[in-house]
Amino acid sequence: MRSVLPVLTVIAALLALWYIAVVPMNAARAVEQAARSDVTLGTADLIRATMDMERPRLPSPHQVFAELWDSTVEKKVTSKRSLVFHGWITLGATLWGFALGVSLGIALAVGIVYSRVMEMSVMPWAVISQTIPIVALAPMIIVLSSSVGIEGRGVPKAIISAYLCFFPVLVGMVKGLRSPDQMQLDLLKTYGASGAAVFWKLRLPSSVPYLFTSLKIGIAAALVGTIVGELPTGAIRGLGARILIGDQFGNPIMIWSALFAAAILAGALVTLMSLLQSVTLKRMGMAR
Amino acid sequence: MIEAKSLDLTFQTNDGPVHALKGVDLQIGKGEFVSFIGPSGCGKTTFLRCVAALETPTGGSLTVNGMSPDEARRSRAYGYVFQAAGLYPWRTIARNIKLPLEIMGFDRAAQERRVDEVLKLVDLEGFGSKYPWQLSGGMQQRASIARALAFDADILLMDEPFGALDEIVRDHLNEQLLALWARTEKTIGFVTHSIPEAVYLSTKIVVMSPRPGRITDIIDSPLPKERPLDIRDTPEFLAVAHRVREGLRAGHAYD
Amino acid sequence: MIEAKSLDLTFQTNDGPVHALKGVDLQIGKGEFVSFIGPSGCGKTTFLRCVAALETPTGGSLTVNGMSPDEARRSRAYGYVFQAAGLYPWRTIARNIKLPLEIMGFDRAAQERRVDEVLKLVDLEGFGSKYPWQLSGGMQQRASIARALAFDADILLMDEPFGALDEIVRDHLNEQLLALWARTEKTIGFVTHSIPEAVYLSTKIVVMSPRPGRITDIIDSPLPKERPLDIRDTPEFLAVAHRVREGLRAGHAYD
Amino acid sequence: MMMVLLAVLVWLALWALNVRLARSAAGGVRAAVPLIFGLATLILWEGVVRGLEVSPIILPAPSAIAAKFVTEIPTLWVDFSQTVLKGALSGFVIGCAAAFAMAVAVDRSPFLQRGLLPFGNFVAALPIVGTAPILVNWFGFDWHSKAAVVVVMVFFPMLTNTVQGLRETDAMQRDLMRTYAASYLQTLLKLRLPAAMPFVFNGLKIATTLALIGAIVAEYFGSPTRGMGFRISTEVGRLGLDMVWAEIAVAALAGSVFYGTVAMIEKGVTFWHPSQRG
Amino acid sequence: ADDLTLQLKWVTQAQFAGYYVALEKGFYDEADLNVTIKPGGPDIAPTQVIAGGGADVTVEWMPAALAAREKGLPLVNIAQPFKSSGMMLSCRKDTGITSPDDFGGKTLGVWFFGNEFPFLSWMSQLGLSTDGGDGVTVLKQGFNVDPILNKQADCVSTMTYNEYWQIIDAGVTPDELITFKYEDQGVATLEDGLYVLEDKLSDAAEVDKLTRFVAASMKGWKYAEANPDEAADIVLEYDETGAQTEKHQRRMMGEIAKLTAGSNGALDPADYERTVASLLSGGSDPVITKAPEGAWTHVITDAALN
Ligand SMILES: Nc1ncnc2c1ncn2[C@@H]1O[C@H](COP(=O)(O)OP(=O)(O)OP(=O)(O)O)[C@@H](O)[C@H]1O
Ligand SMILES: Nc1ncnc2c1ncn2[C@@H]1O[C@H](COP(=O)(O)OP(=O)(O)OP(=O)(O)O)[C@@H](O)[C@H]1O
Ligand SMILES: Cc1ncc(C[n+]2csc(CCO)c2C)c(N)n1
Ligand SMILES: [Mg+2]
Ligand SMILES: [Mg+2]
């Protein structure tokens, strides 16, 4: 709550900057347009012209928000022209990819924490996996998954999303599962506790704060992954497809509104994770 | 029965080996109360950790009740109080105390009963549902003592358990600990920096000195088992204290 | 001169206000050595922090050398030793000690000279180039004392500086501190849990009690300025110690 | 099928070897473990591709990729310098430096911090496929637009980490500075920046992988006729999968070196942090 | 009904109207086919999809198909609904370009991803190198025409039915532009044809299936040619992104109809030979190195068109 005013202030500042930037970004095209109809623009006219171009280099905020409004509130959510509909498609794949990535990340982290070989063999390759551009793998993922008989493009999308999502979870969970200090571990040793007891009673609970931090990063990464995956998977539905079509048909306003929709979706998901985090930590007595 | 014969422990560090323990010979009988005293870094903690199988000696032999320390650990012979409280922050005080009980498979009712008992023992009734960070440092330390007492380990190892407490609380807990020991006949290993505390509590005082960590003196206390607080003003007490102080001083650079 | 008049400090916390200090009246003359003693949570640290302008009182008045605490702070009147060592882990011991000197603009040569001096004072010669984590807890605490002594602050505030040290080292540092105080005529505020330490060092002993944090007794020491260690066996010493102990006990629940 | 079986066996044997090596403490041996794991995986890959006769248009064998790599070194170098040296590196430097400066600048204002940081979540989720066409439009086809994409990608992770790092000092460390009446600048230089370094390097490490991915993907949205992203997309279209994988190998190699360099500097700078002391 | 999957070369748009019309109008159902149409995208190589078994038939340009064939992927053209090429290079007049002779030293935007072959063979016929210097500077253009609008390129690749109109819609007037159609330059290569893997053709059941498919598809194309607006609306119906506009699709359908007009679906061997010749003539770096064998067949169309 304390951050409402600061956030609003920053938003206001960003909007102002954005409006100011619109003028020089679009001026050249506006002048060219005017020249075609043999008009020379005064400063005021020029500014007005840059604010409402059909194909701006930088759309003005009100254009983007009008489009956002139009494609969310004004359209039925089941309509394929509704951003809510496309956001929903993207959200679905994101959640699958997130589930997949989180499971993989946690499983690998547990393996790494409990096995030195796993740590030494897998960890460097996990880093390397993140240096491989996913778009290079995407076509292969699609071809391979269709040749092993997986139909529909939801699955490859989720795989691509999981690929980007698992790494932050892995890193965070390795840190988290290792966060118990020597004394906490020694304590259980003096009780003659089994490996399972150490995991459930010590490692897992102490990794929870790290888990949530990773989940927040992971869900944003999963969303980005899904949208990236929506281009090569046939650009049929989802926010990624909107971006591509907006790009090809010279509709920057469509790109920007899809970008905003993605950012808002991410914001909502991250907020959800934060909420989950504070509830869990409170129940565990770790929120202060 | 704890029996150490020419026990060695050397840590390999970047700037060469550290001889934390060197040729330590010590016998602790069942039901004894043994205090360890000595300057910082003389190996008190290390010795206790060896007994609890938290460290592996690099030489000599060490047996606990005729078993290896590790076997004794797995048969759950130890209650250990660490130098710092080390409570799990996501568990309330009561659930921290329950932790060993859960692991050792006590049933629900027994868990509740024991928690209540030990909380009373360390004067923390009513704090069971608080989280560790809601307690002062001294209260946390008492909770960690309660945790070690909750299950009936034969051997109690305590590493400076009363370091963070003021004199009055300390006296009080000293009395309680003596009473507990008298009642239960546990074997207790106890590390302290305080000479009066060591003398007041122990049947045997082990004075250690550093670099390498070794035993310089073992003093069998002539004090009776029954010890009111004012025993500390008796000549016997002062004589033992004097001998400990001399032993300690020998381990220091200044005279 | 430090002068507190009906000083109050209340912390607002989630479960209501905590009265850390309530109606504290105290006068500390220049060159005095004042010890604060009292149970955990009675406001000793809080009072020292008020003097150093690290906390702002919620009521009453507090002046230091006729200035507000904050003005005194900005004129660099204080050396403060915290309850924990608080060394910066990325600096060696020597560079930790240099830290205040760098900030106050001492020149290179003076920095080196002072570091050598204070390292010797706390018996840490040869450890200047080690990092804090390479030292035992007691050595770290000594390094932090050295850091506070390195620049010549008029007022030295020390919060349980010797808590982590064993009796012998403690005695030694007590002597050193007394000598330093006698030599430099600094004003010293000193928190401790040890009654003998408080009596041995101070010209004035302030006994405090918690909930709300207040002063229950102020004892002006009848002991001479010259204090060999064995002054602790004199009747005057024991009488003062007794009075302190009684004051302390009154603040506790058990009798 | 024999081939696949054999490859699996070799893989298992090397894994067993690794299990034994991992127990030994010597530094050189430990470095071998990931290499052996990589080698084992390559052998498995080769075996599966040959044994199942996977079409080289779907997944080429490592040997074919290696052969392509060797013959195409000049092209790979041109692409590498276009994408990594010009695009990724300059974007990385500009983005991280700007974020760092911004973090220090907003550090004195909790108001700005509270206002700015929530945007991290939003910007972190801006899909690169959306920002890249816009930035190519703005900054042109050459590496400048790739650098811009990288700047956008690395800015917020770096900013959030640095801001958090600058907050990371504990109360006692700050109080100490107060008792010295240290100035803002002195506190910043002598306390907060050193204390922030572990977090700063966390941000830098995240930024290395983002920078590489960003620079490559941005080339899908327009580029000169060189660059790793250009080559990858073009060769996929031509079914030159061996070349695609050669570029992927370059990316992995460059990424590892880049990441490794940052990690090494980190080790030197934050040697004092518990996580570096093992 | 027999299942059949068709992989398109690009996203759902009027370029592929014939197939959508056949689907919507039930022509495939009548032929006892259950057809799935997979739209393409920027990272989908139709040749790779068919190699991986993700589709039975794919829409592809002949240069890419022949190049893939030389890579060892035995693609065979079974039908050629597009008679003529819609590809062109659109330049701003104010760059001074009046004929291909003026290209030297200019910056030209080109699509890659398997679409660059016609351009490359044209340039090599003109004797222009494509790596800067005294030749031309090539830009890999993205999916839009921004480079020419921003004057980052002097010319960009356009299709008569698509990108050209993006430029016009952006406010540039037709007389500010000069366009070079590959058809007019004599370097036209065959565009959207239907390709399958060779082994399908040795299986009588598959041949029968493909025959029915081609027949139904051509029926769709002819219907689309005759009813362009309705066809465009059908395409819009199938566009799941909801981002395509009626104005644009109707216009695209009109232009597409011009390209399919001359074809009954059967490949004209003369067009094929011309395409191969053009691809072979690439100077030092031809797209294909030798004339392919068996890269097309009339088996399907012969059966389908009777
Ligand atoms: N894990 C370790 N690695 C290297 N050296 C160690 C390790 N643990 C302890 N040491 C060293 O072994 C010696 C003995 O340490 P120990 O902790 O037993 O001392 P102590 O007597 O308990 O001291 P204190 O009173 O400070 O607790 C010290 O010199 C210490 O530095
Ligand atoms: N920042 C704070 N917020 C809320 N309460 C505080 C804060 N700091 C101290 N307190 C409370 O104020 C009281 C006095 O604390 P203080 O630290 O001064 O005690 P102390 O006498 O130094 O105790 P100790 O001997 O344990 O160091 C305690 O009850 C403590 O819980
Ligand atoms: C990388 C890449 N860039 C552009 C296109 C565009 N494209 C493919 S077919 C076609 C004809 C008209 O739609 C066009 C423009 C592509 N497919 N792949
Ligand atoms: Mg110890
Ligand atoms: Mg205190």
Image: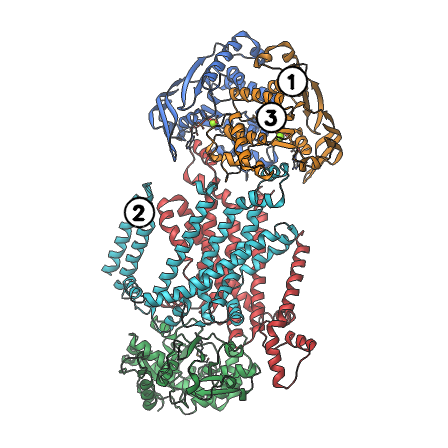
Chain colours: A red, B blue, C orange, D cyan, E green
Q: In this view, does B254 lie above or below C118?
A: above
Identify which residue is drawn at 59% across, 75% down. Answer: A56
Q: Where is mark 1, residue-wise?
A: C245
- The answer to whether residue E218 is visible is yes
| Residue A226 screen position, x and y as percent | 48, 64
Q: Where is mark 2, residue-wise?
A: D18
Give the structural element (helix, strand or loop) at label 1.
Answer: helix
Q: Where is mark 3, residue-wise?
A: B123
Q: In which quarter of the image is ligand 2?
A: top right
Q: Is residue B255 above or below residue B105?
A: above
Give the structural element (helix, strand or loop) at label 3.
Answer: loop
| Residue D39 screen position, x and y as percent | 30, 54
Label 1 to label 3: alpha-carbon separation: 21 Å
Chain letter for mark 2, please: D
Label 2 to label 1: alpha-carbon separation: 65 Å
| Residue C192 screen position, x and y as percent | 61, 24
**Of the pair B213 and E55, the residue shown nearer to us:** B213
Three-letter amino acid code at the position of disc 1? Arg
Q: Quadrant of residue D51?
A: bottom left
- Pointers 1 and 3 within a single chain: no
Q: In which quarter of the image is the N terminus of chain D?
A: bottom left
Chain letter for mark 3, please: B
Three-letter amino acid code at the position of disc 3? Asp
Q: What is the number of the mark on residue E129?
A: none
Confirm or deny contact between disc 2 and disc 1 (CB under 8 A): no
